[in-house]
Image (cartoon, grey):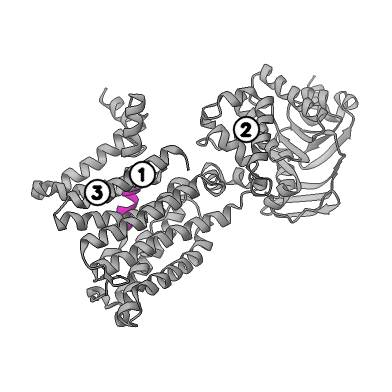
Amino acid sequence: MLIIRSLKSFYGRLCALKGISLHIRKGEIVGLIGANGAGKTTLLNSIMGLLSSKKGEILFFEENITKYSPRQIIKLGISLVPEGRQLFAPLTVMDNLILGAYHRYQKDGKAKIRADLEVIFGRFPILRERKKQPAGTLSGGEQRMLAIGRALMAKPRLLLMDEPSTGLAPVIGREVFHIISELREQGTTILLVEQNAKAALKIVDRAYVMETGRIVAQGNPNDLINNQEVKRAYLGKEYKKIWE
Amino acid sequence: MGKKNLLSLLILSIVVMILPLIINNPYYLSILIFVGIYSLITIGLSLLMGYAGQISLGQAAFFGLGAYTSGILTTKFALSPWIALIIAIFVTAGVAFLIGIPALKLKGHYLAMATLAFGQIIFIIFNQEITYTGGPSGFGQIPYFKLGKFMLDSDFRYYYFVWIIVLITLTLSLNLIHSRVGRALRSIHGGEITANIMGVNTARYKIDVFVLSAVYASIAGSLYAHFVTFLSPGTFGFSFSIALLTMVAVGGMASVWGAIMGTALLTILPEFLRIFHDYDILIYGSTLLFIMILLPEGFFIGLFNLIRKGNLPQSHLLKKLLETRR
């Protein structure tokens, strides 16, 4: 459903993505792993249309969305769970969720939004308890749940997740991964960006490994876990060997 | 809109309607008219600053544009005040739109500087365009509004006229805040990029709310012109922009109710302080200082929270002050 062909993205004159090509099929979880500064978040921002200076092609259901604005892209059904805690902190949990459905609020009407809210509250009961609370007062894990819930309110066909487990206690992190696999079972297609390669590789169908703006390896998770290239891209193992 | 807001609106309407029957002093009544006129501006400013998170130091200029357009059209071109009011709205909205496109790409201090510069330019134009504006000495003999056969020339009548407009504006604004658009505005305040990811057209909403606040100020300007019937540039300078900003901040930035309360407080307080003669400015200044230290969320919002929760809201400034004393 999503095809990216030799995508180059720029921050001013700096070339952050140096020709990325990848594809995502319907119903898949595709992992995108790599160390800090590899360009993972840049890639997500490019898909979302937040970065406008880019070359190459991004096709979503055969539609060229490379030059689209974030608004148009979210309307087509791509939704992003941003990195960290990028919620609307002073707004209530409820307002955050309804804002997630912003682009379809007029088209679908209040009743439908209410029904979808119930679905989200069913999945994340803690959010129901705290729906009147400002989002900034939630714990880290709850905030991440809210960010996911907010993205789901947009009814995305493709969900982009930027490091959903980073900065959480391991238990909560595992819960997040559990939710991700549940979402897949319900038919959501997901592009998962993660630093925690081991955990990510357990739940994805396929994965790409990025390093300094390029894709250096791809394949199914079992192969990648033992792949020398992955270990090198991540840990710099080869240096360690030289040292030893 | 919510039950609380409806109830507050009802209470305010009753108070507003009864007040002139209690107050017989025409001077006090005229002060209350000014409270109404300034409230229109601060409601708009509160939408812009408290909800959308964009600052404007040029609001007095929009107020002035409304007043001068109304004044010039009725005196030099003999138009009816009603038509002048409407033309003034379009002129001000047009100017705000043109200024807004480049200015709202800026953030924080830079936006403040841009709007400040705009305010100064308008102020200079009022001073220099002597043929139309009368220059620094201004011009007078602006006609009153006429409602059918009713001439709105007495304070008593004008009071009701102004406050009905304020109540209508307030109702519309409350409706706006609690709609999808209002949520979008607050999301811009929360984080512009995140709002973008939600599909909110942040650039357009920022301009829309900027133009809306300018329109409110323009209406206030026309009401001012046809009440005072005399205009000079001094009223519309930088210091008035700051005064408006203070009203909104003292009342409580994130609430249109706070904006009205702040406006009332800061317009009426100086009148009470007259009894202190030369010391009035000193007391006025220290009152503001204490409000901002003790109730940083704004006087009325802070007071409300104080009554409800029974403790002072967290004031970083207060904490710092106490620490240094230890």
- Of residues B4 and B243, the one nearer the viewer is B4
The x, y position of residue B221, in whole percent, is: 33, 65
Residue sitting at x 44%, y 60%: B114
**Which of B246 and B318 lies nearest the eye of the viewer?**
B246
Mark 3–mark 2 Cα distance, whole angstroms, equals 53 Å
Q: Report which residue position mark 1 lands on.
A: B10
Q: Circle 1 marks a residue in which chain?
A: B
Residue type at numbered disc 1: Leu
Residue B255: percent from the left, percent from the top? 40, 43
Identified at 33% across, 68% down, the residue is: B67
Query: What span is in magenta?
Result: B241-250
In the depicted view, which residue is nearer to us: A155 or A108?
A: A108
Q: Secondary structure at mark 3?
A: helix
- The residue to which callout 2 is attached is A84
Q: Main secondary structure of the magenta part?
A: helix
Q: Amino acid at mark 3?
A: Ile
Both marks 3 and 2 on one chain: no
The image shows residue B207, relative to residue A91, as above or below, that is below
Could you give the CA–CA distance between mark 1 and mark 2, rounded to whole angstroms?
43 Å
Q: Residues within 10 Å of mark 3 (few under 14, many from 20)?
A: few
Give the quarter of the image for residue B324.
top left
